[in-house]
Image (tube, coloured by chain):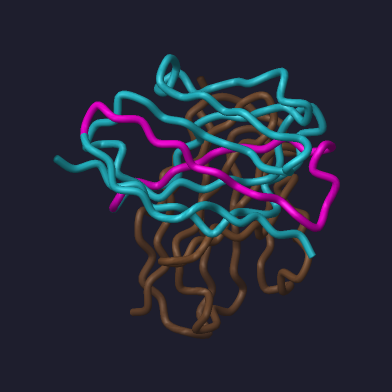
Chain colours: A cyan, B brown
Amino acid sequence: QVQLVQSGAEVKKPGASVKVSCKASGFTFSSYYMNWVRQAPGQGLEWMGIISPTGDSTTYAQSFQGRVTMTRGTTTSTVYMELSSLRSEDTAVYYCARGGGIAARPYDYWGQGTLVTVSS
Amino acid sequence: EIVLTQSPGTLSLSPGERATLSCRASQSVSSSFLAWYQHKPGQAPRLLLYAASSRATGIPDRFSGTGSGTDFTLTISRLEPEDFAVYYCQLYGSSRTFGQGTKVEIK
């Protein structure tokens, strides 16, 4: 069955970086775009960006431009999201989700979420 | 950038009642790329509907969607206890954005 398993919770200091992973199984990883979506406490869902099946193309939400980098390992079926220059407002649950892209698929499978806490 | 505005912010209803949630786009969008998700605390969001009205796998038929252009609606015909949650509409084509959510709470 399709599974997206994310890395564990992180606590970071302001100004630091965090890298969250999402390991896929149960489907042909190299055929799907992958996304990152976050939810800050008390807030709604916020789309962060998307990475192509081969990893050679990324599109980031304007609000994260310059701070976020999404990569993927085709042999490891893992997608990564690195967010730099962390501030307290980046405290959130971060989700990976399968979907979007040229085929414009809805986000049908999601990871379990990774809580990132930014605190001094 | 297209903005999705959901209303109401909170819907207080009893089990068995009908829920009607609205999602309005700031400009006309293709219904082919409009989805609805259910989100419960501590869980990942769950895809309910895609292409505005197509139910995702395993979604009960009490969930239905309509709309085109700028106005879309998610209807839950009779609320079950497990339906109390936050619901988001989303564009997943070339525009990628979520509405701010509607919380369906028990009255």
Horizontal relation, residue A76 to residue B85: left or right: right
Image quarter hosting the C terminus of chain B? bottom left
Q: Residue at x 54, y 73 (%)?
A: B18
Q: Image quadrant of residue A14?
A: top left
Q: Is residue A24 magenta?
A: yes
Image x and y of residue B23, in percent: 52, 45
Q: Residue at x 51, y 24 (%)?
A: A69
Q: Is residue A35 above or below residue A108?
A: above
Seen from the viewer's position, the closer of residues A68 and A108 is A68
Seen as rendered, the residue at the extreme top is A66
Q: Residue at x 55, y 53 (%)?
A: A6
Image x and y of residue B70, in percent: 59, 34
Q: Is residue A58 magenta?
A: no
Q: Image quadrant of residue A15?
A: top left
Query: From which residue to which does the magenta span run?
Result: A14-41
Horizontal relation, residue A39 to residue A23: left or right: left
Seen from the viewer's position, the closer of residues A102 and B101 is A102
Q: Is residue A66 above or below residue A29?
A: above
Image x and y of residue A112, in percent: 54, 59
Q: Which residue is drawn at 85% across and 46% down?
A: A28
Q: Is residue B99 above or below residue B81?
A: above
Seen from the viewer's position, the closer of residues B59 and B67 is B59
Image x and y of residue B49, in percent: 69, 55
